[in-house]
Image: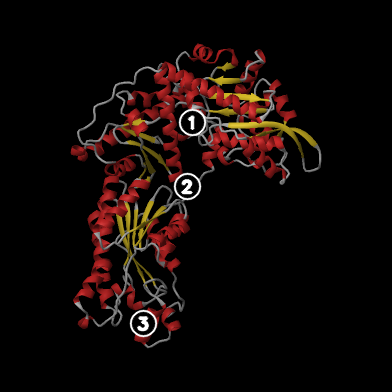
């Protein structure tokens, strides 16, 4: 572990913050917090905290001794001073005399003593920081330390590795009791430079920011060196198939298997993030990987990210890929059954009312390939993958010097179902399309871009497909929610396949298709050049079929239904003069949408069309508006608002129609008209 302290960088930060009224101690606290937070082997997604004790002035000018401690929701790697809320020390220290303090009361005590009441909640380990007398305190979940403490008989090993320089604290769930126990251990030997918390992590402290940080890096290095020096030979590897299936071939199966069935064809879907490297594959190819996964998480706070631990599945044989979907399902079913038993047995031990979380795994290990993180959003899925990499490091180290023996699942349960965490989850309400992936063709045009933005705003991750790569990327960026842009000529089946493969690679699958791309050519039907008509059919019919085929291919593998949405245009039912090259293939596409509804309804795949007219877009340009209004003998304004409502219809209106169909769970084979009212184009 490299010591990243740099005098010049530290002093520059102090000077910069001084201009903003931030004192030297707090500035250096920010600096070393960032150093720790930027190393995943130390701190990962909230799994650590830091503090310093200074003086601060409240809103009426009174000065207080305060503890500035990491606040909830702040990333240590990019923390700012406001991410270390100041809490009055007097009240915190008085709490040590209490015999008990409920978690909710502890949070209330901390919030009641904030200097700034608008600050985020201080860390749940605030009292531990307060009860230690040192000015600076650092806490991490170092994977090297976990290799030492995740052993059955960890106490003597900690003594062997660290000698008398570090105190040992038996496992206690974070909160008031742990704070008191840790303080008692320090009081028993005030010469220690830090504390090793069994099954949990490490605290170091010092009189200044650098001393506390230096001690953290030093003792992590002591642990790393011990593991390296005493490592046993690697465990035996499992036998792999002669030909492995690809991640893309199994991702939709896996994504479908971990979706949470809500009954009557409804699912809470997950996003999947595939992660691989030489180190990942080397570890998960171990013959004992299922055993390791079943033992649990390397540090208890990971249960919030990957539940009771990963799920391991067999390596997929490319020659037997047709059977692999059932293999995945059997493993997911077994994981879920075991999780339900874990919940029910532990929940029955007291009278606390709890609601079981969904029982699906959040991390799947696939020998020969890598691992998949699962989450309701791409961010959550990536966090699960990040956690998986650090779980591997900790388990590899623990097995190298002994046997990986983490906290028991019975002891894990109170943390996973901690009232404070349950309150966070209860306040996190998913959006209507959370967990779903939408692929939109013509995604950089007016209708496509509006649809991508609206779907992303409602929780979906969008794959914006367009002929122009730069415009596709820009549309995806504007849509937000980690949407991606993909360049593709959708009249080329190979490029269509590649676009869907990209969706699978990034998100794990596809749930909604908005087949929107199109272009119009003018001319009387009897005088059209065959090549032009065929060109129109390639884009305005066959491209719709190509993208729908790919979407259905993935949806069937997922087994959770899906939605096909086609932009068919008013021309499909109410042709305009000199517009046959556009209208005839669009009419075929309208009936294509109904054929998909007929053929795939039994699989939960819905298919609907949106019949839009006169939308300003790349298709209906200013020049086209002038031409079409001329063909009808009306002004451009009259042409654009020539409907029963007398109002121009926008791309946003069409996007709303697509969203309606995406959410209308019991509607298929429907055509929704978005044209302001045109009786000639109205359907039944």
Mark 1, residue position: 41
> Where's the C terminus, which quadrant?
bottom left
Residue 464, picture quadrant: bottom left
Q: Residues within 10 Å of mark 2 (few under 14, many from 20)?
A: few
**Tag on residue 430?**
2
> What residue is at 52 percent from the left and 44 percent from the top?
428
Q: How crowded is mark 1: few (under 14 residues within 10 Å), some or many (20 or more)?
A: many
Residue 259 lies, in percent from the top left, at: 36, 42
Residue 655 lies, in percent from the top left, at: 42, 63
> What residue is at 44 percent from the left and 31 percent from the top?
390
Residue 90, picture quadrant: top right
Residue 424, picture quadrant: top right
Q: Looking at the image, is 195 positioned above or below residue 267?
A: above
Judged from the image, the secondary structure of the residue bearing numbered disc 3 is helix
Taking the image as shown, residue 634 lies to the left or right of residue 126, namely left
Judged from the image, the secondary structure of the residue bearing numbered disc 1 is loop
**Tag on residue 382?**
none
Circle 3 or circle 2, nearest the eye: 3
**Tag on residue 628?**
3
* CA distance for labels 3 and 2: 44 Å
Judged from the image, the secondary structure of the residue bearing numbered disc 2 is loop
Which of these two is toward me, 266 or 580? 580
Which of these two is toward me, 646 or 22? 22
């Amino acid at each position: 572990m490299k010591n990243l302290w740099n005098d010049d960088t530290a002093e520059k930060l102090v000077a910069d913050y001084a201009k903003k009224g931030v004192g030297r101690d707090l500035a250096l606290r920010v600096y070393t917090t960032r150093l720790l937070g930027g190393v995943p082997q130390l701190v990962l997604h909230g799994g650590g905290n830091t503090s310093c004790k200074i003086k601060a002035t409240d809103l009426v000018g009174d000065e207080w001794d305060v503890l500035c401690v990491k606040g909830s929701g702040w990333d240590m790697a990019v923390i700012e001073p406001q991410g270390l809320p100041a809490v009055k020390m007097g009240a915190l220290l008085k709490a040590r005399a209490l015999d008990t303090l409920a978690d909710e009361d502890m949070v209330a005590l901390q919030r009641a003593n904030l200097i700034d009441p608008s600050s985020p909640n201080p860390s749940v380990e605030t009292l531990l920081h307060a009860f230690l007398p040192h000015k600076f305190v650092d806490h991490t979940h170092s994977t090297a330390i976990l290799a030492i403490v995740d052993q059955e008989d960890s106490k003597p090993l900690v003594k062997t590795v660290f000698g008398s320089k570090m105190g040992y604290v038996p496992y206690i769930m974070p909160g008031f009791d742990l704070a008191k126990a840790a303080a008692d251990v320090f009081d028993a030997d005030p010469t220690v430079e830090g504390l090793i918390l069994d099954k949990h992590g490490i605290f170091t402290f010092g009189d200044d920011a650098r001393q506390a940080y230096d001690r953290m890096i030093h003792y992590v290095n002591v642990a790393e060196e011990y593991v390296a020096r005493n490592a046993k030979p690697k465990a035996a590897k499992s036998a792999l198939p002669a030909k492995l299936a690809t991640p893309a071939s199994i991702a939709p199966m896996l994504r479908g298997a971990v979706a949470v069935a809500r009954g009557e064809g409804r699912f809470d879907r997950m996003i999947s993030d595939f992660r691989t490297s030489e180190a990942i594959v080397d570890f998960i190819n171990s013959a004992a990987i299922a055993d390791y996964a079943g033992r649990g998480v390397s540090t208890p706070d990971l249960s919030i990210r990957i539940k009771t631990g990963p799920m391991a599945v067999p390596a997929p044989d490319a020659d037997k890929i047709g059977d692999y979907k059932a293999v995945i399902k059997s493993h997911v079913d077994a994981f879920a059954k075991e999780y339900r038993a874990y919940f029910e047995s532990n929940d029955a031990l007291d009278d606390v009312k709890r609601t079981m979380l969904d029982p699906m795994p959040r991390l799947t290990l696939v020998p020969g390939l890598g691992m998949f993180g699962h989450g309701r959003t791409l961010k959550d899925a990536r966090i699960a993958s990040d956690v998986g990499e650090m779980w591997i490091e900790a388990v590899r180290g623990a097995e190298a010097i002994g046997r990986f023996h983490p906290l028991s699942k019975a002891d894990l349960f109170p943390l996973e179902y901690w009232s404070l965490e349950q309150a966070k989850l209860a306040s996190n309400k998913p959006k209507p399309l959370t967990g779903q992936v939408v692929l939109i063709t013509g995604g950089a045009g007016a209708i496509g871009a509006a649809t991508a933005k609206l779907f992303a705003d409602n929780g979906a991750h969008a794959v914006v497909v367009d002929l122009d790569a730069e415009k596709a990327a820009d549309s995806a960026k504007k849509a937000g929610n980690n949407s991606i842009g993909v360049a593709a000529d959708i009249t080329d089946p190979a490029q269509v396949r590649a676009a869907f493969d990209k969706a699978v690679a990034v998100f794990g699958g596809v749930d909604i298709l908005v087949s929107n791309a199109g272009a119009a050519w003018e001319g009387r039907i009897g005088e059209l050049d065959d090549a032009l008509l065929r060109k129109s059919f390639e884009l305005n019919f066959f491209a719709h079929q190509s993208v729908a085929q790919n979407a259905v291919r993935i949806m069937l593998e997922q087994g959770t239904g899906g939605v096909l949405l086609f932009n068919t245009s008013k021309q499909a039912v109410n042709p305009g003069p000199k517009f046959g090259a556009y209208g005839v293939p669009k009419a075929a596409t309208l009936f294509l949408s109904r054929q998909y509804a007929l053929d795939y309804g039994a699989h939960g795949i819905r298919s609907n069309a949106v019949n839009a007219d006169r939308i300003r877009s790349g298709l209906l340009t200013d020049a086209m508006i002038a031409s079409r209004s001329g063909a009808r003998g009306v002004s451009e304004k009259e042409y654009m608002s020539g409907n029963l409502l007398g109002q121009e219809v926008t791309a946003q209106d069409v996007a709303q129609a697509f969203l309606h169909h995406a959410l209308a769970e019991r509607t298929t084979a429907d055509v929704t008209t978005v044209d302001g009212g045109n009786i000639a184009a109205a359907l039944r």
